[in-house]
Image: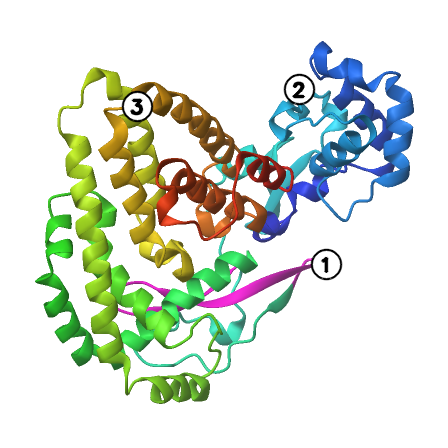
Amino acid sequence: MPLAALNQVSEARLDWLVPGLLREKLEALIRALPKARRRHFVPVPDYVSALMETLAPDEPLLPAMTRELQRMSGLRIELEEWQAATLPDHLRMFIQVVDRVDGKRKVLAQGRSLDDVKDRLAGVTRDLPKPPEAAPALRGQEWLFGELPETEDQDLGGMTVRRFPALVDIGSEVELQYRDDEVEGAWAHRWGTARLLSFKLSVQLRDLRKQASQMAGFQKLKTEKGAMARNALDHALLRLLAEHFRLDEPVRNEAAFRDRLNAHRGDFVPWAQQQLATLGKLFAHYRQLMGTLEKNFPLAWAHAHRDLKQQLGQLFPDDVLLQVPWAWLQEYPRLLGAIDHRLDKLGGQIGKDRTLSAELEAYSKQHETRAAGAPLWKQPEPLQQFFWMLQEYRVSLFAQQLGTKLSVSAKRLNKQWEQC
């Protein structure tokens, strides 16, 4: 494949290999399971034949195998248990990334793991070639970008590569870039459009920034050194622009941008003032909890300290105000309130809390492993839902009186996990 197509190749599709080798691959995957798991699928060839009749390459291979084998045997194999990386080379697709250097074909990287190949090329630019009319970089504080289609297709030596035009926030300006991933393109375009709006509302944002900087929550964040605290106010203003001007519906041309701005600018400031006050209280609550955890905890509470630090880290990633869905941000005061209740009762029920911490840690580890470092917005929807159900499960365990947004229990969590 050419370098420009690298991120558009689906690892899920590569897993299906080629039809003539699929049966052998399915059998090898089952035989690579630990004996205690493998014995549920004997004789292996019979189970493989059943899989061949039901599986189709319109979905990822391993989740499909997991589902069908569970239906046949009642046993669920977690995705992490499959030993795909240990299969013989001929049962793993060979990937070769090529480019033309000085008119000659050059192999940039090759291997049988798409992730490894991508890692090796991390330092190589993956920008798709720009069409002649877009050769000069388009950037500025005005809409200079004409009509932006949702997608553009380009022929690269007989291969059609699809790219996604997006306005990208580069701080003092917005730049037109071409992303090779649809989700990433939509994500970047939303915040790029919000930044473009900020230039049009610079006077209003200056006053809002001044007001917010005097709020206790934003002031207390300054005691932290991380990126979340450093960017909180800027991200807050971008998020309020995105929500108030409804940028979940993408703006793709200057007329639409102007219409969106004019339709909603009139009541932006009073609404934003209210939202900043709410966010200020949220950050003050967060800092109060972090301050409690930063104090000397009794050794007997170590399990709770570890679990709560992990939970707060998950709820407040560096880009929390850009990453967390707006509806869930509204639930954060209740989620933090549940932590208060847990801490208040901790001294009188250390044994129970230790047991619950072990259960929660197992669920959290499941999510962390499956997410593989992807930010929340980039995770599959079922996995995102599992994450929020887990937060609500915490509320039900430690502060049931606060209520939950979702019906949740260990049984429901496990059922949701089967969709992940």
Count neighbours of disc 2 (C-alpha within 10 A) and say few if under 14, some if 14 to 19, many if 20 or more.
few
Callout 3 amino acid: Gln
- Earlier along the polypeptide chain: callout 3 or callout 2? 2
> Which of the numbered marks, if any, corresponds to residue 86?
2
Furthest residue toward top: 35
Between marks 1 and 3, how big is the CA–CA gap? Answer: 67 Å
- Residue 158 is marked as 1
Gap in angstroms between the C-alphas marked 1 and 2: 34 Å
Q: Earlier in the sequence, mark 1 or mark 3?
A: 1
Residue 132 versus residue 167: which sits nearer the camera? 167
Q: Residue at x 73, y 46 (%)?
A: 59
> Element at badge 3?
loop
Magenta span contains residue 169: yes
Please, what secondary structure does the residue beneath circle 2 have?
A: helix
- Please state the total of marks drawn on the protein image: 3
**Residue 312 in picture, x, y percent from top left:** 30, 40
Sequence order check, earlier mark of 1 and 2: 2
Is residue 140 shown above or below 327?
below
> Which of pointers 1 and 3 indicates the residue nearer the eye?
3
> In this picture, which residue range is highlighted in magenta?
155-180
Query: In this figure, which colouring scheme has been used for the structure?
Result: rainbow
The Cα–Cα distance between marks 3 and 2, rounded to whole angstroms, is 46 Å
Judging by the rendered image, the residue that carries numbered circle 3 is 349
Residue type at mark 1 is Gly
